[in-house]
């Protein structure tokens, strides 16, 4: 629904021609997410689909139909990469696994992105981002008591998997350039999340525990300002010295409680926070962040959606892309832009997400030479949309 679609959208933004094969009437499951807008035919197009499918073409093929599977395999030799995001084993059961695809196109790069990979004891589990995030250990690490806060940063489990899939695709393509060999790239969302939440096992192995008697030695907190919160991260003693000077507490330099970083957390709420907030509450988030940054302390305002959309750096770096809505709503759909900036690759122009099956005839005619009569037959049989 999101992991592979984000990866292929990123590749499309970098110049790849991406054709998305969807069920001819239901489409990608992301189309059914909420909130949603309506396409020109009045069908729902969900938010998850809208975020992850710019610059692609949509072909509607029923892979459960024998003729649909044959169409899919006929398309394979026309493309460098075939990528799928089903639960492990799904395409194999349809006769469209790596062996079948490689038989048609030995040089193909075949990418499988699933929750747990092709050889995991969990491979029969369905998975969304929250499931692999939980299994990575980060939820229990961040909220050791009580129910975990799920999906704390959006689609971390999806987008991290997407980035590793993109790396795998690019490496496999480079390998093929050198050797002529295709290969299978197997990406598990759980593997990606364990990598992204690296501190969970790493800190544990070094003896760190969630124990007030064994502080980690850092300040990573939000502090109240006149209009919200500023977040700062202090991880070295020299940064704490600068913070003490900035907030008017030079006596902290010689305070035995702050002889090293391990005294910060035990005294955070009683000593450090009141002093910092006495200073920060007299400033806006932007003013506090500016002064902290000028002092060499990493900090930034905790922003809302309207603020991040309107922030000048966002506008300057094309981090927000607008997609006009076809159903008469004036406010456009906003989607994050391409975060990869290359000096010799043009950025954009972006094309909107495809409507379901919008490019079916175009792709099948161009790639397979199917004429209008044959397309009409396949559509009448429900094979294509």
Image (cartoon, rainbow, N blue to C red):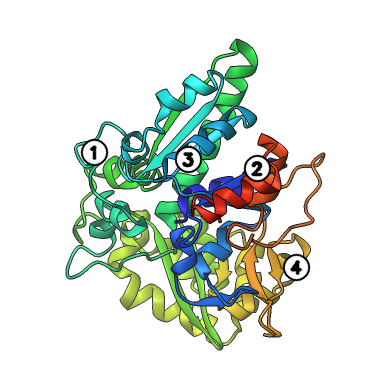
Q: Kindly report the distance in space between the C-alpha atoms of the residues bearing marks 1 and 4.
A: 43 Å
Is there a contact, CB below 8 Å, between mark 1 and mark 4?
no
Q: First in sequence: mark 3 or mark 4?
A: 3
Q: Closer to the camera: disc 3 or disc 1?
A: 3
Category of crowding for the residue at label 1, using alpha-carbon neighbours closer than 10 angstroms: few (below 14), some (14–19), many (at least 20): few
| Viewer-closest of 308 and 26 | 26
Residue at image mark 4: 315
Q: Nearer the viewer, mark 2 or mark 3?
A: 3
Q: Secondary structure at mark 3?
A: helix
Q: Which of the 4 image quadrants contains residue 114?
A: top left
- For the point 57% across and 87% down, which residue is it? 282
The mark that comes first in sequence, 3 or 1, is: 3
Q: Position of residue 21 (x, y in %)?
A: 54, 48
Q: Are marks 1 and 2 in contact (CB under 8 Å)?
A: no
Residue 93: image quadrant is top left
- Relative height, residue 119 to residue 228 (above, below): above
The CA span between labels 3 and 4 is 47 Å
Nearer to the camera, 281 or 385: 385
The answer for how far apart the CA atoms under marks 3 and 1 are is 54 Å
Q: Which tag, 2 or 3, sits closer to the chain's start?
A: 3
Label 2 sits on residue: 364
Of labels 2 and 4, earlier in sequence is 4
Label 2: state its secondary structure.
helix
CA gap, disc 1 and disc 2: 54 Å
The x, y position of residue 330, in whole percent, is 71, 85
Q: Residues within 10 Å of mark 2 (few under 14, many from 20)?
A: some
**Residue 163 appears in view:** yes
Disc 1 target residue: 205
């Amino acid at each position: 629904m999101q992991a592979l679609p984000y990866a292929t959208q990123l590749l499309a933004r970098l110049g790849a021609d991406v054709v998305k094969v969807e069920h001819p009437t239901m489409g990608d499951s992301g189309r059914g997410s909420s909130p949603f807008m309506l396409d020109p035919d009045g069908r729902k197009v969900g938010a998850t689909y809208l975020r992850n499918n710019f610059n692609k073409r949509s072909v509607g093929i029923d892979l459960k139909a024998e003729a649909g599977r044959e169409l899919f395999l006929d398309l394979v030799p026309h493309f460098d990469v075939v990528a799928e995001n089903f639960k492990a084993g799904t395409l194999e059961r349809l006769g469209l696994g790596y062996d079948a695809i490689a038989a048609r196109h030995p040089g193909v790069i075949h990418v499988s992105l699933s929750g747990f990979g092709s050889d995991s004891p969990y491979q029969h589990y369905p998975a969304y981002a929250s499931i692999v995030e939980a299994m990575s250990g980060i939820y229990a690490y961040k909220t050791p008591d009580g129910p975990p806060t799920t999906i704390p940063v959006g689609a971390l489990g999806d987008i991290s998997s997407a980035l590793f899939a993109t790396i795998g695709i690019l490496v496999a393509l480079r390998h093929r350039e050198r050797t002529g060999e295709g290969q299978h790239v197997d990406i598990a969302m759980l593997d990606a999340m364990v990598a992204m939440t690296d501190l969970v096992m790493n800190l544990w192995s070094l003896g760190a525990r969630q124990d007030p008697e064994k502080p980690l030695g850092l300040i990573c907190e939000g502090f109240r300002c006149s209009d919200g919160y500023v977040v700062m991260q202090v991880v070295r003693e020299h940064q704490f010295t600068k913070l003490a000077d900035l907030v008017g507490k030079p006596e902290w330099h010689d305070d035995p409680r702050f002889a090293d970083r391990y005294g910060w957390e035990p005294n955070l709420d009683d000593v450090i926070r009141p002093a910092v907030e006495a200073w920060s509450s007299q400033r806006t988030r932007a003013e506090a962040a500016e002064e902290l940054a000028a002092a060499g302390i990493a900090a930034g305002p905790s922003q809302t959606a309207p603020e991040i959309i309107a922030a000048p750096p966002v506008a300057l770096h094309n981090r927000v892309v607008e997609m006009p809505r076809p159903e008469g709503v004036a406010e456009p759909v906003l989607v994050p832009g391409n975060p990869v900036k290359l000096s010799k690759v043009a950025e954009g122009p972006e094309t909107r997400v495809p409507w379901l099956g919008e490019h079916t005839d175009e792709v099948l005619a161009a790639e397979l030479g199917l004429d209008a009569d044959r397309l009409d037959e396949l559509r009448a049989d429900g094979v294509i949309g």
